[in-house]
Image (cartoon, coloured by chain):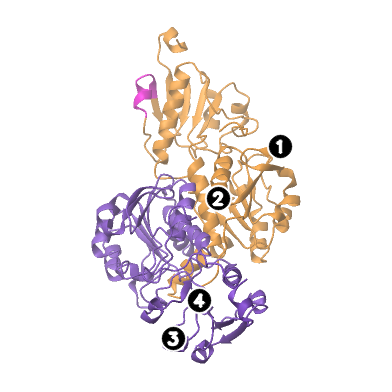
Chain colours: A orange, B purple
Amino acid sequence: MNFFDESGRKPIVTVLVGDRPVIGLERVAALADIRETDAAGLPMALRGADVLYLWDFFSGAVEPAWKHADALTWLHVAAAGVDKLLFPGLIDSAVTVTNAHGVFDLPMAEYVLGAMLFSAKGFGQTRDLQHNRVWARRTTRNIAGARVLIVGTGSIGRCTARLLTAAGADVNGAGRVARTDDPDFGTVHSSSRLTAVVGAYDYLVLVAPLTAQTEGMVSAEVLAAMAPTAVLINVGRGKLVDEAALVRTLDDGGIAGAVLDTFAVEPLPPASPLWGMEQVLISPHMASDADSWLDDLALQFERNFLTWHAGKALPHQVDKVLGYVPTSGADR
Amino acid sequence: MNFFDESGRKPIVTVLVGDRPVIGLERVAALADIRETDAAGLPMALRGADVLYLWDFFSGAVEPAWKHADALTWLHVAAAGVDKLLFPGLIDSAVTVTNAHGVFDLPMAEYVLGAMLFSAKGFGQTRDLQHNRVWARRTTRNIAGARVLIVGTGSIGRCTARLLTAAGADVNGAGRVARTDDPDFGTVHSSSRLTAVVGAYDYLVLVAPLTAQTEGMVSAEVLAAMAPTAVLINVGRGKLVDEAALVRTLDDGGIAGAVLDTFAVEPLPPASPLWGMEQVLISPHMASDADSWLDDLALQFERNFLTWHAGKALPHQVDKVLGYVPTSGADR
C-alpha cells in the first residue's frame, strides 16, 4: 500500500530531456503521468510534479525553475557527480536526491586500470612512434606491486581498488576519515594529509567528487611532493587539481606523466598546453561511458521508481550537504 | 657431491655475448671457468666447454659452430622462444636445453591485459584525436565478461589467463590437447579446431611458441571465422599469423582491430600497410621487457647453474622436438 494507492491518483514524473531522447520509461509510464520537457518548459512542468528525473544531467535549468517545484519529493539525476546540480534551495529542501550511484563503478575502474597500463607499458609513445613508422624497443614497468593511492573512497573508488588489487597493485585510499582497517583500501589517509603521504606512491588516482572540501586538493604542494616517476590519473573532476600547477609540474618533469579524463574547463580549450604534452593522455570525459551506459542509467531509474512508488526508502541517497553518496567499507 | 668435485676440475661455461655486456655472473665465476665470446670466437670457445650460455639470444651463431661442441652437456638461452635456436644437430644431441621459462610471464600477461584495455577503451583513437586537439566523447567496452581465447597454454598463457580472469574476463585456452577441466582455462580447445571455435570470442590472444605445428595457425580461414567486433592480440610470434591475410581482414573490417607486438619480419618493414592502420597498434616486440628483465634473466641463469653444478636435474627443460617447455595445469 503506498501513497498513490490511497490517494487514487497517479504520481507525476517530470523528465528533463536534452539532446538525447529519454529511454526506458515503459514500466514507469504504466504507473505515473510522465511530462517530458526541455529546459525552457521546466518551470511549467515542475508545477505539481512529484518526481524530477534529470536525464539531461548537464543542464543548469533546475535552480532557475526551482520556485515552481511545489510538490516535489524526489529528484533523480542520471549522473554520478552532483556538483553542478546542488544549490541552496535544493539543499535546504526536503527533496530526496539520488544519482547514478554504482552505474559507473565498473567502467571507471576499468578505465583507471587501462590508464595505469597505458602509462606502464608506454602505449602513448608506441602510438606516436607508429605514426612515424619507427620501431624502437624500450623496457616497460610492471603494475604488479605498484603502489597506488586512490583519492575518493565511495563506490567508484572501492570498485577501482578491488580491480587494481586483483591485478596485483598495492592500493591505499585517501578520504575524509583516516583509518587503517578498510576492507578495500587497508590504510585510508586523511585527504588533508596528501602532501605528507603522496611521495610513497607510483600512481595517484582521483575519483573523488567535487565539493568545497575537495576543490583544488591536488595543489602545487601535493604535486611537488609526488615522486618524479609517479603518474597522475584523474577520472574525477578537473577542479580537484590546480591545473596551472599541473602544467608546470609536467613541464618541469616533477612527475612522469598523466592520464586526464576531466578538466577545469570542458571541452579542454584548444589552447591548453596539456594537449601537446607527449607524456599526457587527453581523454574527453569518457571514462564512465561504457557502451551500455544509457541502458544502465534507464534501468537504474526504473528500479528506483518502483522502489519509491512502493513507498520504500530509496537506496544510496545523496547527502546534499556533503555533496555525494556517503559509503562505508561495508556498503558494497 | 657432484661430477666436478670428483674430477677435481672446474666446469667451463662459454657465454655468447652480443651488444649488451653480460651481467650477474659473480657466483658462477666462483665455481666455473668462464669464457666470454662473440659469434666469431664461438667455435674456439665451444671446445671443451661444459655449458653454453646464450646471453645474446638473437644470434644464429650456434649451428655453424656446433661441430666444436665436444664436451657440452647443457645449453641455456636467455629467451623464451627457442624457434630460432633449434637445429637438427642440437635436437639429436644429448645436450639439455633450458630457456627463460617464467621470467617473461608477468610482463607479458600485463601487456596483454593492457592491450585489451587499450582496445576496449579506445585509447588509440583518443591519442590520435589528441594530436589534433579534438575533443570527441565516445562510448567504450568493458572487459568484464569479455570472452577471451588464449592460444598457448604454457607458463605465459597460464599467467595471462589468471590475470585476465582476475580482471573479470571469461577466459578459455587453445593448445595441443583439448580438455575441459583445466585449472586456469576451464575449457581448452584443440588448436586444430580454431576455425570452429574462434567466432565465440571477443579477443584472440596469441602467446604460443613458433613450431612447425603452430606456424600460420591463424590462417585466412581462422581470421574469417572471427567476429567483426573481435580484436587480435599477438605477443607470441609473427609467423603464427598469415600476415597478408590479416592485412586483408583488417582492411575489410573482418575484425575490429589488433594489437601486434610480433611480426613475420622484424623490425616491421616501413612499407607494411599495418603501420598506417588506425585500428592497429604496432608495438616493437617489447611485451616481455619489463625494466628488470636483464636482472631477471641473469638471476635465472645463476640459479640454474647452481642447480646444475650440484648435480641436480634442471627444471623446465625445453622439449627439443616439441620446441618449448611442456607444462601442465599442475605445473605452476
Query: Viewer-nearest of labels 3 and 2?
Result: 3
The residue lying toward the viewer, choosing from A293 and B106, is B106
Sequence-first disc among 4 and 3: 3
**Structural crowding at the residue carrying mark 4, measured as other residues with C-alpha within 10 Å and reported as few (<14), some (14–19) or many (≥20):** some
Q: Secondary structure at mark 2?
A: loop
Sequence-first disc among 2 and 1: 1
Whole-percent x, y for residue B71 in the image: 50, 84
The residue lying toward the viewer, choosing from A262 and B183, is B183
Q: Are marks 4 and 1 on the same chain?
A: no
Query: Viewer-nearest of labels 4 and 1?
Result: 4
Q: Which span of residues is magenta-colored?
A: A25-34
Q: CA distance from mark 3 to mark 2?
A: 60 Å
Amino acid type of the residue that numbered disc 4 sits on in the rendered structure: Trp
Q: Are marks 3 and 2 on the same chain?
A: no
Q: Is residue B250 visible?
A: yes
Residue at numbered disc 2: A262
Quadrant in which residue A224 is drawn: bottom right
Query: Viewer-nearest of labels 2 and 1?
Result: 1
Q: CA distance from mark 1 to mark 3?
A: 68 Å
Q: CA distance from mark 2 to mark 4?
A: 56 Å
Residue at numbered disc 4: B74
